[in-house]
Image (cartoon, rainbow, N blue to C red):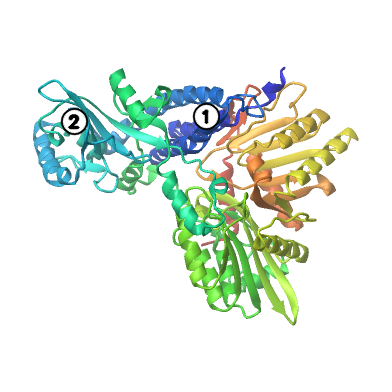
Amino acid sequence: MSEQSMYMNRELSWLKFNERVLEEAESEKVPLCERLSFVSIYQSNLDEFFMVRVGSLIDQMNLSKDIRENKTNMTPKEQIKKILEQVSRLNYRKDAIYEKLLGMLEEYEIKIVDFSKIGKKENEHLEQYFKTEIAPLISQTIVGKWQPFPFLKNKEIYAVGVLERKNGKEKLGIVPCNAGVFPRLIHVPGSPDTYVLAEEFILHYMPEVFPGYTVKAKSLIRVTRNADIDADALYDEDLDYRDFMVELIKKRKRLAPVRLELSRELDGNIVDTLCEYLDVKREYVFRNNTPLDLSFLFQIQDRLRNVPELFYGKRVPQYSAQFCKDKPILDQIQEKDKLLAYPFDSIKPFLQMLNEAAVDPEVVSVKMTLYRVARQSKVVEALIEAAENGKEVLVLVELKARFDEENNIEWSRRLEDAGCHVIYGLDGYKVHSKLCLITKKKKGKLQYIVQVGTGNYNEKTARLYTDLSLMTSNAELGKEASAVFAALAMGETVKQTKHLLVAPNCLQNKVLEMIDDEIECAKNGQDAYIGVKINSLTDKKIIDRLILASKAGVRIDLIVRGICCLVPGVKGETENIRVVSIVGRYLEHSRIYIFGSGEREKVYIASADFMTRNTLRRVEVAVPIYDPELKTQLEEMFITMLSDNQQAREMQNDGNYVRVQAGDTPLNSQEYFFEQACMEKTEE
């Protein structure tokens, strides 16, 4: 077996993850309206993949022909070729799933139709509607000598037509089908829940838009633009960083296209002309049989809210039994460490902790890292209140949180206006840690309350993502958290830690050391174990050390939701490694590291995946779990996830995933955790 067979290419592994998302849209076990969500998520995932990953590969390919990926030794060109092949295959599958779901919607009297299925009388009504409601809002363009090809916005839909004059001359006509200007779903008269999509509506009436021309061919098109900008490489230190990021966002919207999607077959010459105008190579052109933007499916869901069986059963986060409702949260944390598991537990105790800190006279400071927050953030409101009450409030707002920059810029302004000390990340590093430090001064002595999480401080995602949040008054952890914030305030990173694992200097190396410890134990005949739950595994140093551990006899369980570049089960190499992925109702987002067993066991929760970008190019924090009861809780959660036989897939030694067989006792880990929460806790 060659060395390369132990590795999976990162991009192809991601596509396998998105295929697992598509499988949920295909699964008859999933309620119909939830299947609509999964097919839409598949598409939005793919959009971001092209914007970021394919865009990056194209940049690499244009930069040098000698760049090779460090696990499978593939060049950017080779990776792109494989990606385009896989995307074509998956899109064909997506088209079939979408058509099936539309057919199932018709059982509930909801139809998305084209004009071939609309009667003459309805057509007359729609034509009048077009003339009075749509046509006055259209801004069409005829490309020619005096009118250049227009700029096509990222992910917007346009109707394109080949127009012919009576003299036989042809021109290109383009009509924006602006999302937000027109209603996306246009009701067909005479049928209560029959709709035509706005872009199909505009495409149908193109002859009305371009009078005097014959429309010889037409299609809807959609462009995906590169969004991969290195902010640090472009930053001019003489500029205000926040203003620079505002300009960077504007620039990203105008970057080069990396994909062109068509809704109809067009003559090859026409496609070549579009590619020339857009500077897109022909291989990046995709023909879709589904709408070019599936976000309207969420509107369809809203029409069916009165049919409960079409949705997952209602699940409400529970107020954790670890907390008493009639006692201050800060006092309870000082008595005993607490652990919240979202979305099974409510985020309310954490928010109460912040609100108490904002008004507690003994609290002198609140420090926090913010990566992604809700649009209407109760977390930020609590920080603002703390500052207005005279507390020292230090907030690191990461302006480089991709696609959340605008929201973070706005919150940073509000925090500054309230008197918070706001810093904007570090030169060369993203601050991705989920760290909060509350400092109290009681009788002249400092006391620390530390919170470390695996997910963002976002009330919305706390209901949608599985995440963990530790709250502790451990003095040693408090001192190290204080050192992290002191370094951040100086624009630096922590160089040394004893308890916390803090990237970029004190996480990868410590993980490697703990793997080495397990290797030594295995060589000495002791029980050696590594259990890791993360979103992605791409860090080659860690992968290679895990391979060594497997060869030494260390038993290794990896729960990796998305990208996994390590292939298990390769004879003589990775035989002791098992890789499982769980894709279900909630996005698996928590990170757990377990090293050793019995008295040697170390357990951490962390913000970091095992990706080089996390371990070496970001500020990340992993926190050890010292409380025995919480340790046991996490161990049991990990074992339960490993035992999932409803939403879990296991990677085979050829890199493909197969669903875990249910056997006699079906177990959906996410549902199990909610049932446990409901048994033990009080509803939110």
Residue at (54, 38) in percent of width and height: 583
- Residue at image mark 2: 115
The relative height of residue 666 versus residue 362 in the rendered view (above or below) is above
Looking at the image, which is closer to me, 648 or 350?
350
Looking at the image, which is closer to me, 457 or 618?
618
Q: Do callouts 1 and 2 mark residues in contact (Cβ within 8 Å)?
A: no
Quick one: label 1 or label 2, which is nearer the N terminus?
A: 1
The relative height of residue 547 versus residue 466 in the rendered view (above or below) is above
Helix, strand, or loop for circle 2?
Answer: helix
- The amino acid sitting under disc 1 is Asn
One can see residue 647 in this view: yes
Residue at (63, 27) in percent of width and height: 68
Residue at (69, 28) in percent of width and height: 568
Q: Does 237 sit left or right of 601 as displayed?
A: left
Foreground mark, 1 or 2, reads 1
- Residue at image mark 1: 62
Q: Does 151 sit left or right of 398 as displayed?
A: left
Q: Residue 477 placed where, x, y %?
A: 74, 62
Q: Callout 2 environment at 10 Å: few (<14), some (14 to 19), or many (20+)?
A: few
Q: CA distance from mark 1 to mark 2?
A: 44 Å
Q: Residue 361 placed where, x, y %?
A: 62, 81
Helix, strand, or loop for circle 1?
Answer: helix
Looking at the image, which is closer to me, 490 or 27?
490
Q: Does 379 sit left or right of 309 as displayed?
A: right
Q: Residue 587 placed where, x, y %?
A: 53, 44
Quadrant in which the N terminus appears: top right
Looking at the image, which is closer to me, 672 or 555?
555
The relative height of residue 195 versus residue 389 in the rendered view (above or below) is above
Residue at (12, 31) in percent of width and height: 119
Location of residue 652 by image quarter = top right
Location of residue 153 by image quarter = top left
